[in-house]
Image: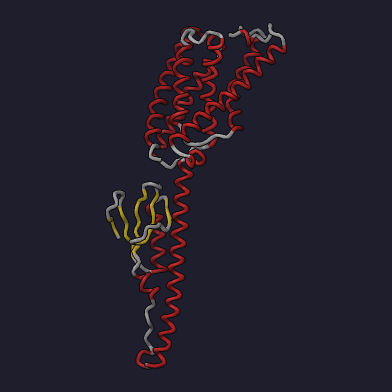
Amino acid sequence: MKYSKVFNSCGLVINIATLILSVFGVTFIYLDLGMASLTYFTFYAGLIAIVYSIVSIVYNGLKFRYPRYKIPPEYASFKLMCVTTLMVSFFVPLAFAKLIDSYFYIIRVVVAPLMLFNFIFFDFDQKLSFKQMFYALIPVVTYGFIISLLIIFNVVQPPYTFLNVVANSWYINLIYGLIIILGTILLGYLINLLNHCFRRLFIGEEYVETGYTTIINKIALEAEEDAKKEVNDDKNSDEENQNVDDLKSENNDENNDSVENKKPISSYQKKYSARVYHISRQKVVGKWQVKLANSKKTIKYFDTQLEAINYAKALVKTQGGSIRVHSLTGQMRKS
């Protein structure tokens, strides 16, 4: 978890660079080729890179503002889809020796590897399942279907020979289609696998399987359960002591009428009347905690300081004691 801010900072810098390069690349491609640029998959991959960069920059900002912000599964699939789409725009022209063509090289040679590098080495929020790899097919299949229709109706000329569905035999088109679909799924799987291996190497097994947010929640829940158990054990023990004190009091009443009307103070009352509940910010968990003085275990966590104070007041009302509130720096702020 110590790497979180570093990875988020690096990711933010790369996302900003990706956005700038993608905007320049798409603009130069359109200025160079005009409407003909709309027939190339790389042009749409550049548009996807722009959307990806904007969304990722917003997400990086949320991570800085709210460290425990949990990424939605849909966004994780979207990121893998975008990175895979850019890598398809890299490998397909490479196979036809058209990797550096016009201003397409900005998207293919610069933006695509940059997004891949960012995803593999700095994106560690959620492990994707195999079925989520199929989201990577959405841009590829959509483009292939639309461009094939336009070629069939002679609206545009095929940018690559394998897209000439009119001149090619049906089985040739089928083979090309299967290669593109299976290759895209395999590419998405390999990209996610590299990301998974890097997380396992630098972060650890538990992080790979759960993610930052799940680990933090797990720590908070375990600490809360342990604290509740400790409070219940103390209460049961004190109730037993109270019963013993009551029995002693009854025996003393039989032998001494002068103390007949005196009600003894039990150890339970003594202990709980001396309780001091401290409210402070727990930096690791990122929440406000309520805990007893001289106790290592937290009773309960809260998102806001006000919720923690209200909970502590309820404990004082039922069990006795007092409240001490600490500031963000840990100093005593008020009682």
Side of 126 relative to 290 (left or right): right
Q: Quadrant of the C terminus?
A: bottom left
The percent coordinates of residue 305 (x first, y second) are 37, 53
Q: Is residue 45 above or below residue 161?
A: below
Q: Is residue 173 above or below residue 18?
A: above
Q: How is the image coloured?
A: secondary structure
Pick whichever, 194 or 36, lies toward us.
Answer: 194
The percent coordinates of residue 288 (x first, y second) are 38, 52
The percent coordinates of residue 96 (x first, y second) are 56, 9
The percent coordinates of residue 30 (x first, y second) are 48, 11
Pick whichever, 297 or 140, lies toward us.
Answer: 297
Pick whichever, 81 or 121, lies toward us.
Answer: 121
- Numbered disc total: 0
Q: Is residue 172 above or below residue 236?
A: above
Residue name at image x 44 percent, y 54 percent: 223
The image quarter containing residue 167 is top right
Which residue occupies the extreme right position in the image?
170
Residue name at image x 59 percent, y 24 percent: 186
Q: Quadrant of the N terminus?
A: top left
Residue name at image x 62 percent, y 17 percent: 144
Which residue occupies the extreme front position in the image?
201
